[in-house]
Structures are given as structure tokens and as C-alpha cells.
Image (spheres, helix red, strand yellow):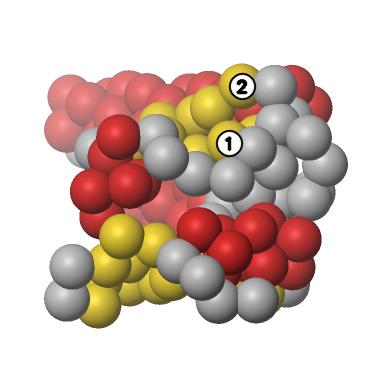
């Protein structure tokens, strides 16, 4: 994996290389990333959507367990705490495994865990590489 520095204005306007941020293959769609969008293949888009759905489902499950714990008291409190911890842990873990990291650097964003081909193409947008 590699990292790429892109201007925030380019990320928000969609001025990105036409290669998938995760696979380096030709991008066919984009996925939302903060206020912008990143280019991806259909398979990566589906994987990101599945991860989001799992995260939402775990969040809903943890919320239901918490409500039941308040209503019934007792042993379900431990189950609710465990469900919340599991939901947050798995959701965070899925995000790290399947997605891109980002760190603001002035008027730009450093995208981490990107494919080297995407990183090279992003560098070319700014005359680097």
C-alpha cells in the first residue's frame, strides 16, 4: 500500500485519477469520502457498501441490546456493553481493513492505504512522477 497527497479542492470536486484507489484498476464509479469522492471499481464499491451495512446493523443491534438492558436490568447490562464494544470494534476494524485513511496537511489531504498506481497517478496530477 502507498499514500498520496491530494488537494482538498480536487477531492471535493472529484478531480481524481481515473484508477481505483484500492486496486489500481480502471475506476468505474466513486464512493463518498468525507465531502468528496474517491474512484473505485464496482467490486470495491460493493465491499465498502457491505462494510457500511454491517456497521449499521451492529450499531442497531447494540442499541436494541442497550434498550433491553435498561428495561430488564440485570445480566443484559453486561450483554449490552459487550454488544456495543463488539459493534464499535468490528465497525472500526472493517473500516481499517477495507478503506482509506486520511490526514489533513494544510490545503491537502494525505490519503493512506491506497494502491501504488493510484498514488503515482495522483502525483502526476501535480507534476510529480
Do we see residue 74 in this rendering?
no
Question: Image check: 116 left or right of 85?
Answer: right
**Residue at 64% of width from left, 37% of height from top?**
18
Query: Where is the N terminus found, in terms of image quarters?
Result: bottom right
Nearest to the observer: residue 127 or residue 11: 127
In the rendered image, residue 113, in percent from the top left (x then y), is placed at: 62, 67
In the rendered image, residue 72, in percent from the top left (x then y), is placed at: 24, 27
Q: Please say if 123 is above or below 40.
A: below
**Residue at 26% of width from left, 55% of height from top?**
8
**Residue at 58% of width from left, 64% of height from top?**
124
Nearest to the observer: residue 72 or residue 3: 3
In the rendered image, residue 47, in percent from the top left (x then y), is placed at: 70, 31
Question: Image check: 63 left or right of 71?
Answer: right
Secondary structure at numbered mark 2: strand
- The reply to whether discs 1 and 2 touch (Cβ–Cβ < 8 Å) is yes
Q: Which mark is residue 114?
A: none
Amino acid at each position: 500500500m502507498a499514500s498520496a497527497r491530494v488537494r482538498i479542492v480536487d477531492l471535493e470536486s472529484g478531480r481524481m485519477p481515473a484508477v481505483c484507489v484500492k486496486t489500481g484498476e480502471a475506476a468505474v464509479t466513486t464512493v463518498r469520502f468525507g465531502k468528496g469522492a474517491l474512484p473505485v471499481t464496482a467490486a470495491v464499491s460493493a465491499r465498502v457498501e457491505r462494510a457500511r451495512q454491517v456497521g449499521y446493523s451492529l450499531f442497531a443491534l447494540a442499541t436494541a441490546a442497550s434498550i433491553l438492558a435498561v428495561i430488564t436490568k440485570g445480566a443484559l447490562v453486561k450483554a449490552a456493553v459487550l454488544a456495543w464494544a463488539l459493534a464499535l470494534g468490528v465497525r472500526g476494524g472493517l473500516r481499517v481493513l477495507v478503506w482509506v485513511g486520511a490526514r489533513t496537511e494544510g490545503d491537502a489531504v494525505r490519503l493512506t492505504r491506497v494502491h501504488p498506481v493510484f498514488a503515482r497517478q495522483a502525483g502526476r496530477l501535480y507534476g510529480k512522477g
